[in-house]
Amino acid sequence: MQAPPTRGSAGQPETRPLAQLKQVPQNVHHTCTFPLTNVASSELNPCPELSHLALTTAATFLWRVVSMIPYLFIGIGIWLLYIGIEAYITQQANNRKCKLATQWPTAQAKILSSKIELGRNKSSETGQTYHTYTPHVEYSYEVDDNAYTGKQITFRRFFFYNNRDDADAFSNRYPEGAIVPVYYNPAKPGEAILESTPAEGTIGDILMPGIGAGLLILGLLGVLGII
């Protein structure tokens, strides 16, 4: 295939191979520079509408997130308030059972096993993690010639010690093989406890519901637009 004819020096048509016309030197590089001076902002950002839409969308999303904070406070506040009130009610009920148990009859029980379990707990006051020492005692006793086995130490919701010495002191009161008195329920002889001392209140009993009530109030004020 030949390229279109060109005029020679004598006016005659001149033909060249197409491959020669397409030949381009390999070491030639083309560099284009464009001056940035006096360039309109619309030329630098050819789609200003898209940028405005993106900013509007981001602002709308951020506003929705901020507007949800009061509802988040309300949810967390109700949850903490519920847990605090439920724990308080349970503790008071257990304390009433402890006081009632002091009026139960007693029976002689034999300690079958006595040990201390090492655990970890988190303080509701400081948030720090610490070791706990929980006594476990198993005993057997008889009521009206009927044999029973029990593991209940107390009616307290939580029964553990924060240091090993106190836990050992309690465990030494109930060594394996010892004979000790237990309080049993005359209506249900299979229900018995070793200790009838009620649990003492702590600052955590009022701290959790107090924080929950505070968050709930802040959330309601935010929803109403007061703050």
Image (cartoon, grey):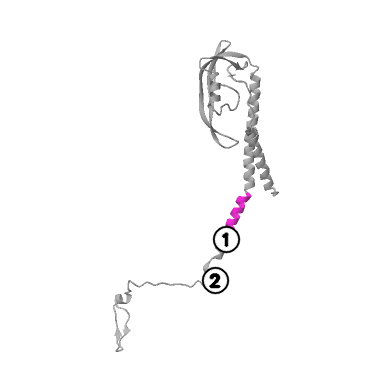
Tell me which segment is drawn in magenta. Answer: 56-67
| 3D distance between C-alphas at marks 2 and 1 | 21 Å
Amino acid beneath label 1:
Leu
Predominant SS along the magenta part: helix
Judged from the image, the secondary structure of the residue bearing numbered disc 2 is: loop
Q: Position of residue 195 (x, y in %)?
A: 60, 20
Between tags 2 and 1, which lies in front? Answer: 2
| Nearer to the camera, 99 or 191 | 99
Rendered image quadrant of residue 184:
top right
* Label 2 CA crowd tier, 10 Å (few <14, some 14–19, many 20+): few
Q: Is residue 33 magenta?
A: no
> Circle 1 is placed at which residue position?
53
* Label 1 CA crowd tier, 10 Å (few <14, some 14–19, many 20+): few
Q: Position of residue 118 (x, y in %)?
A: 51, 28
Rendered image quadrant of residue 181:
top right
| Nearer to the camera, 9 or 139 | 139
Q: Is residue 192 above or below residue 217?
A: above
Q: Position of residue 43 (x, y in %)?
A: 52, 70
Q: Extreme bottom residue here?
A: 10
> Circle 2 is placed at which residue position?
40
